[in-house]
Amino acid sequence: MNKIKAVFLLILISCVCISCSERNFSNPFDPAISPRDWVPEDLTVTILSTSSVRLDWKHPGAYRISTIIDRQRNSQEEFVEIGRVYGTTYTDSTLQPGGTYTYRLRAAIDDRTSDPTTGQSIRWVNEGVLVWEENGPSMIRTLDFFHTSYMLVAGMMDGTIRAYNGLDGTLIWSIQAAGTVEDMDISADDTRFVAGTSQNTDLNTENTLEVGDLANGTVIWQESFPRQMVSVCFSPDGHTLASGSYDYKVRLHQSNDGILLWENSNGYHINKVDISPDGLFVASAGWDHYLNIWKWVDGSLLWQADCSREVWDVNISGDNTKIASGDLANGLKIWNVDTGSLLWSDIHSGFTDLDIHPSDRSVTCAFTDKTCCYILANGTMMWQYPKAGKIQYNHGGNKIGIFDNNGIVRILDSETGDSLWSGFHDDSGWCMSFSYDDLLLTTGGMDQMIKVWYAKNAWIKMD
């Protein structure tokens, strides 16, 4: 019996020793475990709105333990505990605009806490503030943000094409196109760009269509044409692209290799091509006064409308039911896609630019001396603004930009036409683009400057 007791005691001592030697964070209540081993991991801050953020993190072990959330308002203030939770997420809905907030976490068991995590900070930015600017080698013809990131691409008069980090202006790559950049577009998956160029004898450039890799600027294919390639557009799936040229031709190409799928004539110089959001038809218009609608699959003509004068712009609504055209005779016209019938029009002096609201709520048209906004469905005037120029809605549709010939950038409320903020260039404005989330706006023109502005009041994460 004594032997059995001795063996049992020996086994018990061995188990205790093994337990002591195998202490780990699966038992954080063990007083021998240092609190520094409890530090939460992988803290991330997700901005939800102007008043709230969500914090997410992981614990270094599988156990139930609480987390203390500390917050610092501006760098000179002390950290203050704002919450204590079980789990690995927390939403702070008490933000006040302005300054900075920094968050850190501490794991806690009773009155024992871990060391804090490294802080994660956000800061407030005000709309209209210039983020960065760069003087390009020549006048800026086109600017486009990527669809899913803050990268942007600029096309210039001398054929330079450059990609930048839109947040800080870092140059990613730069190439030299064969001709003066007339128009550019970016595929929906952000893998390719297309540039249409024109010949400039002084610069020894050519009329080309060029498709390149957005990651590094490498040209995938290039083709020369007898006249300027002034308008280009990717299809929604990125597999094809349409081009319009001063050689009177509208063409549809395979985007990966440039193979011509079909071509047709507009009758005279083409100013604009557009592919419908559903990818079923191509619109083209130009100097022959006609708006032409072509079947995407084979290029057969669906219908044609006489606009009386040169047509400078065409824009297809997001629901594929309406087409807006701008011409030199009667200004703005809205057409029924299915029948080609004129739904409504408005006559003003001259034409500059037009854009359709992202949700088809309205259409805005810039004329010679003013900008007018209408309800797209029926043409009811919503507002007028006494300036005109290049115009563009932001992606959310709550704002619209006007970039005029005096170099003034104006951002308006798209519902009321009220001015929200303005910025300045030293010469005429030619192009503008909003980032995918409307945080940034980039502008460029004849002064050779690329400028990037904060386009809304917002919180942003700090590095």
Image (tube, rainbow, N blue to C red):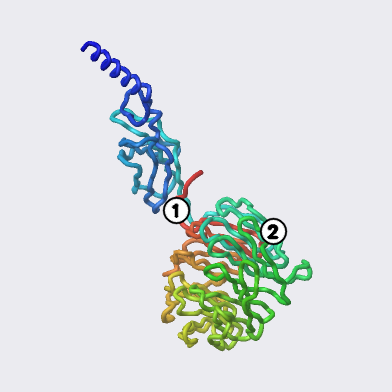
Q: Amino acid at mark 1?
A: Ala
Q: Is residue 46 above or below residue 210?
A: above
Q: Is residue 441 left or right of residue 31?
A: right
Callout in the foreground (1, 2): 2
Q: Is residue 328 visible?
A: yes
Q: Quadrant of residue 238?
A: bottom right
CA gap, disc 1 to disc 2?
A: 34 Å
Disc count in the image? 2
Local secondary structure at mark 1: strand
The N terminus, quarter of image: top left
Expressed as whole percent of the image width and height from the top left, the position of residue 325 reads 53, 80
User: Which residue occupies the foreground of this view, 385 or 183?
Assistant: 183
Sequence-earlier tag: 1 or 2: 2
Q: Is residue 423 visible?
A: no
User: Which residue occupies the foreground of this view, 12 or 463?
Assistant: 12
Q: Is residue 31 above or below residue 196?
A: above
Residue at which label 2 appears: 175
Q: Amino acid at mark 2?
A: Ile
**Residue most toward the left?**
1
Local secondary structure at mark 2: strand
Residue at which label 1 appears: 458
Expressed as whole percent of the image width and height from the top left, the position of residue 314 reads 55, 77
Q: Is residue 339 left or right of residue 70?
A: right
Give the class, few, some or many, for how many residues have Cα within 10 Å of label 1's Cα (few <14, many ≥20): some
Circle number at residue 350: none
Q: Residue at x 35, y 22 (%)?
A: 18
User: Which residue occupies the foreground of this view, 416 or 206?
Assistant: 206
Expressed as whole percent of the image width and height from the top left, the position of residue 148 reads 51, 58
Q: Is residue 63 above or below residue 354?
A: above
